[in-house]
Amino acid sequence: MIVSAWLIDLAVVAGAAMVLPLAIGGRWWRWEVVAVSSATALVLPRGAVAAAFALPWVVVACVETVAAIRVATDRRIASLTTAARSVAGGYAVVAGSALVASRAGFEWRGIVEPIVELAAVHFTYAGAAALVLAVEARAVVPARGVGACAVVVTAIAPPIVATGFFSAHWLPQVGGAVAMALGVFATAALELARSLRRTESRLRRLLLAASGLSVWVPMALAVAWAAGQHWRVPMLSIPDMVRTHGTANALGFVACGLLATRVLGRAGDDLELAA
């Protein structure tokens, strides 16, 4: 349990320091301040002071999201891509809000730690980052139907999953997990298709292949865990899910995917909305 708690905290700090700057953009120094502030919040006892140290995440995420929307509006760009990027920014705000709630000691109807802190992790990685990867994959690989499906399904899945946790009803919890898995699977398939292109650099192809291959079993584990909350089906414990599902998705799918698309090269000028 100690190891899994440490991994969750590490995922939170890495999300602020590396994942969100790459996913939704903005000034890197702001996100590094958020990372340091969030790390401080995580080592302080839960309460008002810890929540205050987590608050810069919400502020910076709001600023960068508004900036991205303003750029899109000024350029009069209206598309699925710009809408998805706005949603990704919104998920970064939700992630920060979840961290504030976690450090404040928020509990509601059986939703206790580590679920509250994991909400910050999921809205960072499965929310903002996964949606940006879907947008990047759709922009490059010509399978437009699959790409649009990846973007739309990945965009709507996180709030469905959250509804399942708050309502404790099987339909949104399991249905949201299935939707999230399908969206990520579609993105992974497009990444694997791109990794076969000889026009891509060898390093980018390797990173895309790693990203595309890393999610299939971990997302199946997520669906099994959601189903296990309502029926007697085999599932892993939360600590085991953190070590397997969480680590593979964070390091494999998200980190490799963002390095391939947001560091080694972007899909197009229209994707750079948050400079």
Image: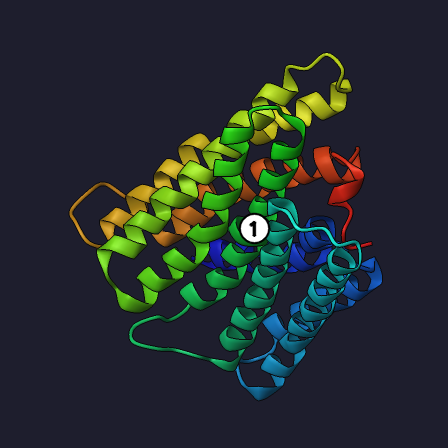
Q: What amino acid is found at the position of numbered circle 1 in the picture? A: Tyr
User: Residue 43: percent from the left, percent from the top?
Assistant: 61, 72
For the point 37% across and 71% down, the residue is: 112
The answer, for residue 10, to whether it is visible in the render is: no
Q: Is residue 67 left or right of residue 109?
A: right
Q: Is residue 242 left or right of residue 224?
A: right
For the point 38% across and 78% down, the residue is: 107
Identify the colour scheme used.
Answer: rainbow
Q: Relative to 7, does residue 67 appear above or below in the rendering?
A: below
**SS label for mark 1:** helix
User: Residue 269: percent from the left, percent from the top?
Assistant: 80, 40
The number of numbered badges drawn on the structure is 1
Q: Relative to 167, does residue 183 appear above or below in the rendering?
A: above
Q: Relative to 238, does residue 197 appear above or below in the rendering?
A: above
Q: Is residue 44 left or right of residue 154?
A: right
Q: Quadrant of the C terminus?
A: bottom right
Outermost residue, left side: 232
Outermost residue, front side: 76
Outermost residue, bottom side: 48
Q: Relative to 194, does residue 22 appear above or below in the rendering?
A: below
The answer, for residue 18, to whether it is visible in the render is: yes
Outermost residue, top side: 198
Residue on which disc 1 sits:
125
Q: Between 130 and 42, which is closer to the camera in this rendering?
A: 130
Q: Callout 1: 10 Å neighbours few (<14), some, many (20+)?
A: many
User: Residue 130: percent from the left, percent from the top?
Assistant: 56, 45
Q: Quadrant of residue 76?
A: bottom right
For the point 36% across and 50% down, the residue is: 176
